[in-house]
Image (tube, rainbow, N blue to C red):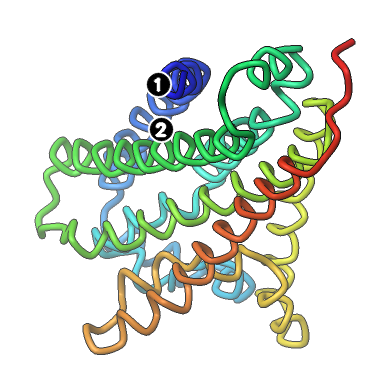
Amino acid sequence: MRWALWAKTFNDAWILTAAAGALLFVFSGLYVYMGSQFEDEKLNVILENLPDVFSKVTPIPLSQLITPLGRIAGLLVDPTLFLTCGLWAVARGSDAVSGELNRGTMELLLAQPVPRYQIVLVQAVVTTICAALLCLIVLLGCYLGVWLAQYKTGVDFERYSRGVFNLFCLNYVIAAVTTLLSSVDRYRWRTLALGGGFMVTQLIVKVLSRLKEQFEPLRYCTVYGAYEPWWLIDAKPEAYWTLFLNLNGTLLAIGTACFILATIIFCKRDLPAPL
């Protein structure tokens, strides 16, 4: 039955993941290719004439946007990528418990000789694997875009992959928080709304922390405060692992804690009868 549980969970996840992956691959390739069409001199003039507020809001220094690495790093903070990855993570997390309850399939799962904790554990593992696949697809899309663009200077994909891993950690924690919300709910639509609200609220707090110095401490109140792909890409070798632990370590710790708590809640709660 355990293998059947794994097969069912992968079967539930693959369509959504494939659709998101196709969109991310095409968008990543086009983003990188279109970014290469700007002439460096003209782009530099545009960046120099932007209002000062842009330098506060953008996660990447404006002076780095004229370099190939800085330009393709802009993909990792693009709203389209944010929304696609975030909505995917919320959709996957909401399916863990409330999705099964809403469809009426949870009773069938619990009738099988499978411990309760394995139901959430398998969901968490499959979601983590799919999140890693999506980030790998983003990296492949960027590689294709760079190959088509034929930049005059090479792009260090080893450094760029540091930022992509930061994206994986962000997807992991959003999916974990939504799984935690799913573990206490019975309606998937409500879990989707709460998970989406969490994602948007956290993003707004992150933007506020950049706009004003007095709001800067707010970045420690949002998981997006640990999403700084450019810091990792641009980090010096001696500072990289400290930064890695501070940013990625924080996201992975929060995500793992949410998955564990969701498992505990699900194992202890009384599940409602199917309608």
Q: Which mark is residue 86?
A: none
Q: Position of residue 202 (x, y in %)?
A: 72, 59
- The mark that comes first in sequence, 2 or 1, is 1
Q: What residue is shown at x 40% (from left), y 28% (from top)?
A: 21
* Left or right: 127 as drawn, with respect to 51: left
Of all residues, the one furthest to the front in this rendering is 113
Quadrant assignment for the C terminus: top right
Classify 10 Å Cα crowding around label 1: few (below 14), some (14-19), many (20 and above): few
Tell me the quarter of the picture where residue 266 sits: top right
Q: Which mark is residue 24?
A: 2
In the foreground, 229 or 60: 229
Residue at which label 1 appears: 3
Q: What residue is shown at x 55% (from left), y 58% (from top)?
A: 256
Q: Amino acid at mark 1?
A: Trp
Q: Amino acid at mark 2?
A: Leu
In the foreground, 225 or 112: 112
In the foreground, 201 or 121: 121
Mark 2 lies on a secondary structure that is helix
Mark 1 lies on a secondary structure that is helix
Q: What residue is shown at x 70% (from left), y 31% (from top)?
A: 97
The span from disc 2 to disc 1 (Cα, nearest Å) is: 30 Å
Figure check: 232 above or below 139:
below
